[in-house]
Structures are given as structure tokens and as C-alpha cells.
Image (spheres, rainbow, N blue to C red):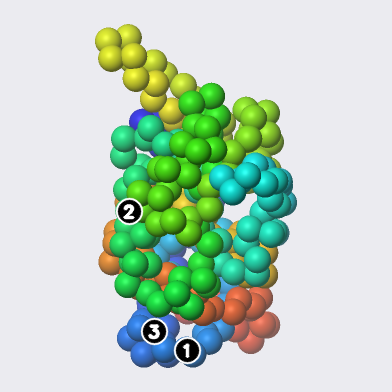
Amino acid sequence: MILRDRMPWRRAVSLGALCTSLAGCGRGEATLTLIEGSSGLGGAEYPRPRAAPEFTLASTAGTMQSFTSVRDGKVALLFFGYTSCPDVCPTHFAKIARVMSTWSANERARIRVVFISVDPDRDSLPAIRAWLSNFDSTFVGLGGTREQIAHVLTAYRLPPPTFTRDSTSGFVDVGHSANVLVVTPDGMLRLAYPFSTSTETWERDLPILARAVWRAPTDSAAGRSARR
């Protein structure tokens, strides 16, 4: 598996204050305002958040859906992979599903988990739906032609997939980005969570992401940050 995460990033600061305001990162209904560049979340932050590129692909529900309609004003966890993936894809989705399985229906509705297959020749829409349902039936599956997927990957500044066939087993390994991308309710692409993200990090971060309201840093906040 080729793991290529070609995104500029920076690590954020301590989560102590965030956990306190969310009652230990639990399920309180408090809304937390996070300042760009100082969230303290475990994902890598884009130094310059940008509007998530729009696209329309076929969904496993049998309709064409735009990314805006899929997000529906919620936090979106966007991942590009393939259903035959032996490690990265199932590991990410198992961890996220494990965390969300303990949430109420109302809490789960705040997050949209979106999977886009980069292997359309083998991943039919029914195959994508069956694979996702192994983790969570509410996870959204999208597919398209190679050309359509390539267009979306380019828009998100991700590398194209690579296909390598093992001469002995015949298994086709697909190289793809290992990042889960986070698009916040304001439609901004802000964070990326790598393959190494632990279940504990998802347990801590997902409730924060579900309730957070993001804003640009004020002059005073930027000044305080610069003096640290």
C-alpha cells in the first residue's frame, strides 16, 4: 500500500481548555468556538483553510448527489479509498464506527462520513454499500468514472491512485491518500487525520468537531498567538 499525504500541515496546541469547556470531551450540548490555527485537535490543520471543492457523484442510494447535499450543513469526514483495501481503509472506518456506535441518533446526525472509491472498475455502488454497512449503515458511499474521480482528487490536491498487480497472487494494490479530510459545517476544508490516528484521538476529537463553530482569528488573538 502506497501512503501519500502531500499536504502542508502544522500541529496544534493543548486540548486542556477544550475538554474542560466540553465537560471532559463528553456529550454536553455546549457549542465551542474554535479559532483557526489553534484548535488543539489531533488532526493536521491546513495552514490556510479553503472552501471544500464541490462535486457531484453517484451515491449508493441510486441518485446523483452533490457534496453540498451530502454534507447538509454537518461536519463531513471525507475519505478516498477502495473496498479491497487490506489496511488503511478498514482501519480508519472501524475506528470511527466504533466511536460513533456509542452515540445517540441525534449525536450521530451531526457527522457525515463519506467514502469515495478510487477503484471504480472493481467497486460497484452495491459493493461500496455492502462494504460500508460492515461498519455503519449511515456512512455515505459515492462512486464515479475514473475521469470523475480524478477530477475530484485534483480539486482536493490529492495524488491520483496507483494500481500495482502482484504477479503471484494477482491482487491489485491501490496506492491512495491515507488522510481523512474534515470539512466543517461552513464548507471549509480544515483538517486531515492520518492513518496513524488512534481510536482515543477519534474519541476525543469527534465530539469536539460535532459541536464546534469555527472563526477566523481576530487581530488580538493573532497577536497573542504570535507572542507565545
Amino acid at the residue labelled 1: Glu
N-term mark: 2 or 3? 3
In the figure, is residue 174 to the left or right of 75? left
The residue indicated by pointer 3 is 27
* Residue under the image location 40 percent in, 57 percent down: 136
Q: Nearer the viewer, residue 161 or 99?
A: 99
Q: Position of residue 222 (x, y in %)?
A: 61, 79
Q: Position of residue 63 (x, y in %)?
A: 67, 46
- Mark on residue 29? 1
* Element class at badge 2: helix
Mark 2 vs mark 3, CA separation in Å:
21 Å
Q: Is residue 171 visible?
A: yes
In which quadrant is the N terminus drawn?
top left
Measure the C-alpha gap from mark 3 to mark 1: 6 Å
**Please, is residue 213 above or below residue 197 in the view?**
below
Q: Residue at x 32, y 57 (%)?
A: 95
Q: Position of residue 46 (x, y in %)?
A: 56, 58
Q: Residues within 10 Å of mark 1 (few under 14, many from 20)?
A: few
Task: Give residue 94's mark.
Answer: 2
Q: Are marks 3 and 1 in contact (CB under 8 Å)?
A: yes
